[in-house]
Amino acid sequence: GQQLNQSPQSMFIQEGEDVSMNCTSSSIFNTWLWYKQDPGEGPVLLIALYKAGELTSNGRLTAQFGITRKDSFLNISASIPSDVGIYFCAGQPPGAGGTSYGKLTFGQGTILTVHP
Amino acid sequence: DAGVTQSPTHLIKTRGQQVTLRCSPKSGHDTVSWYQQALGQGPQFIFQYYEEEERQRGNFPDRFSGHQFPNYSSELNVNALLLGDSALYLCASSLLVPSSTDTQYFGPGTRLTVL
């Protein structure tokens, strides 16, 4: 099946620093999504990307859909303690449900720790 | 307006038993997807329900089955439980055709432990 390689696996940063994480795939995706998961909670959607080359921001978060449709990155600027959590990328392959959030493939997650 | 709710929160079963997990989607949503998240891993897609039919399925055996009711709520059933079925089971709801302002929402999950 399709695999998503997410890196880095973990990050330890100081408050105020910028963060960058990325996902790559051996196959193309029609949609890229970025989620954050806190302990004991389900993932929360941060940013959705629908077109190759698309660059989208949500507050201090910026994500891009790679031109090849096989990669995406997420940047967090000026990190704060509440950014702590696990970040997941997810992709929807072609034919997996059209515009619905169907059959998503998730990366392994990036654990972010922010030191005050 | 309640978001996605799941029950129970935690469950302990023994090998060979059967389990039923329940999900109520966000108000107004018609599509429910189920995911299995093993410890330290990303969620894995099990299947998706729309209009009481299984619309898509991931690479899970037939021991995993589901149902969607006319009120859009859903159940996940797992038969003949194995130790490897221990995981957090997540339910996600959305509209079949979501908008940029109404996307997909996950519930808090059910933690299943198989002994």
Image (cartoon, grey):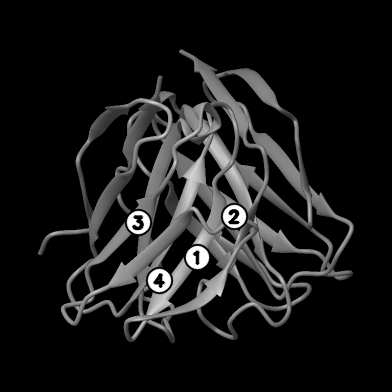
In space, the residues marked 4 and 2 are separated at their CA atoms by: 25 Å
Check disc 1 and give the amino acid type.
Phe
From the viewer's perspective, is residue A113 above or below residue A97?
above
Contact between marks 1 and 3 (CB within 8 A): the answer is no
Q: Residues within 10 Å of mark 1 (few under 14, many from 20)?
A: many
Residue under label 4: B103
Contact between marks 1 and 2 (CB within 8 A): the answer is yes
Residue under label 1: B47
Residue closer to the observer: A98 or B53: B53
Whether residue B26 sits left or right of residue A85 in the image: it is: left
- For the residues beneath circles 4 and 3, the answer to whether they share a chain is yes
In space, the residues marked 1 and 2 are separated at their CA atoms by: 9 Å
Q: Chain of mark 3?
A: B
* Callout count: 4
Residue under label 3: B76
Looking at the rendered image, the disc whose residue lies closer to the viewer, 4 or 2, is 2
Check disc 3 and give the amino acid type.
Leu
**Residue B41 at x, y percent in the picture:** 60, 34
Element class at badge 2: loop
Of callouts 1 and 2, the N-terminal one: 1
Q: Is residue B21 visible?
A: yes
Element class at badge 3: strand
Of callouts 1 and 3, the N-terminal one: 1
